[in-house]
Amino acid sequence: MPIDIKNPNFEYIETQEELNKTAAVLSREAVLAVDLEADALDPYTLKVLLLQIGTEDKAYVFNGKLDLTPLKEILLDERILKLLQNGKFDYEALKASKGFSINNIYDTMLAERILTTGLIRENSLGAIAKKYLNITLDKDYENYNWQEVGLTGRITQKHLKYAALDVLVLFPIFKKQFEEIKKQKLIEVSKLEFRLLPVVAEMELRGTRIDVKKWHQNIEALKARRDEIVVQIQRELKPYYKIQQVDLFGSSDKVLNLNSPIQIVEAFRKLGIDLPSTGEAVLRKVNHPVAQLMLQYREAEKLITAFGENFLEKIHKKTKRIHPDFMQIGADTGRFACSNPNLQQIPQDSSFRGCFIPAEGYKLVVADYSQIELRIMAELSGDKVFLGAFDKGEDLHMKTAVNMYNVKEEQVDKKMRTAAKTINFGLMYGRGAASIGAQIGVGPDEARVLLDKYFKAYEGVKAWLDKAGKQAVKDGYSQTLSGRKRWYIMPDKGDPNYERLLANIERQGKNTPIQGSSADITKYALINIYDRIKKEGLDAYITHTVHDEIVTEAKESDVAAMTKVISEEMVNAGRQLLKKVKVEVDVKASDFWEH
């Protein structure tokens, strides 16, 4: 039966007696839709104004002022499937404000992302209601002024209809989405993402603690380093300028503005170097001290901008911790994305990592997979040399360097190993000889020679990479080991950029199965660890994750047990998808975020 947008079927529950009776009715349902309206987005400061729980035919809208405890068991009941849209918000809002959570979730927003990865990102409730039901919901949030409702308590019929529709539309959307999920064989991937949702919500709620004093010291040290680099650059260039720039106080040692592309191009011309642009990729190819200094300057500037005072403003006034926003399927490969602030931007060797600290009496237990993407490439390609190296516990980068440079292991220097590492990882991202050569400091021809030696040593890897790229173009999608799909928009043959666009799809076709499988393994690990923490009653929490790295916070008395849990469950997660290659994990307990 179609939904009546103007007059949705709902009942407004305003008394505790009505709530208790309704809870008894809802507890007998197999599937329920859940949503809430609040006066803000911050789970630690918001006020729940309305809680909506709907059956397929009727929505029950509960006043948020009531004692919602009788509904707690319904939301926790594993036998009842709960339909939500952007369920992470509702989970966090209820957990922070009411103290209870939600189990057995189907999230229509995540489902839509799974079904359309690589194609579109229109997964708001309004967009998917239009797509599946051909109805237009009034999603003008500002028009309802929920903040004012929080202050006045005045709830109108307009607010109630809005709230009711948000749950009633989830049933027909769910039915149509689920048919497509079955058709595309994405049930297991969907289960993975739905099980992960509470883990991510709890991770965001916990957040992580920052050593503010040390953070300030890092910023000042970076600024000093940046200023030192500026002086070095100006000193290097000064002999090439007859007249220096003049400031308000007269003569200055500055000869150019380092943030002006025009002036930088002119400066390099004076050095006898013509730059097509001032991008980082261009500067990396320039063999001159000024180019290296420019790159160092930009890196320092980038860190100062990204991790300056703006970062510290993200520390929550109530919890005194930062609570980043983690998007489960942020990248089309299935990887997480992070924002507000973005922890993925923090370099592994950055001193800023040392500012992430546990609460008093706790330790950070940090773990990451050992060369997981290379192990996945070994699994996918079945390359005997790759598999053999991991089976014997050999250093694959060292082995690659030996094969590429025709030297003995003891003759491999740091530069050779770095070049081998660059090629190992670069090929997984579909990079060619020119790109890899520029990074390792050799010309395209020499890079091609090295790649030829690489592929001669690892014939299985070459065969798989070639096949994966062509398969992506043929099928119009790529798959991870878990069955996750990433679709591609195929270019028109009449497009003047047809060949370039097709080559880009081939590159993504090589990388997606590897990076996506790595993301899936990390997600299984997060779920496994979360479940074990609850099962064993440990005083421990997952605080954040960056690619194949998981950071947890454990009571000092539980550190040993937590280390064991993380090691076992990360390996178990890897074994779910990797059948031919060993999985190894590095775990370390510390007083700060160590890699």
Image (spheres, helix red, strand yellow):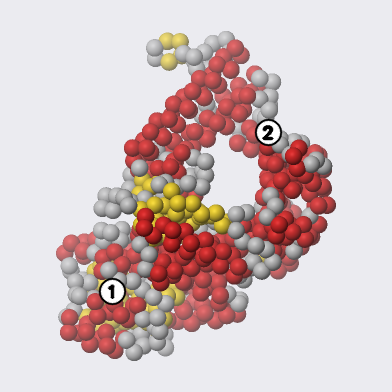
User: Please, is residue 41 above or below residue 272 in the view?
Assistant: below
In this rendered view, identify the residue nearer to me: 227 or 365: 365
Q: Residues within 10 Å of mark 1 (few under 14, many from 20)?
A: many
x, y percent for residue 393: 68, 55
Residue under label 1: 51
Which circle marks residue 264 in the picture?
none
Q: Is residue 194 left or right of residue 471?
A: left
In this rendered view, identify the residue nearer to me: 357 or 587: 587
User: Please, is residue 87 above or below residue 425 in the view?
Assistant: below
Q: Are marks 1 and 2 in contact (CB under 8 Å)?
A: no
Q: Residues within 10 Å of mark 2 (few under 14, many from 20)?
A: some
Task: Identify which residue is drawn at 65% across, 22% down.
Answer: 269
Secondary structure at numbered mark 1: strand
x, y percent for residue 291: 62, 28
Q: Is residue 292 left or right of residue 549?
A: right
> In this orientation, does residue 332 appear?
no
Task: Identify which residue is drawn at 31% across, 50% down.
Answer: 360
Secondary structure at numbered mark 2: loop
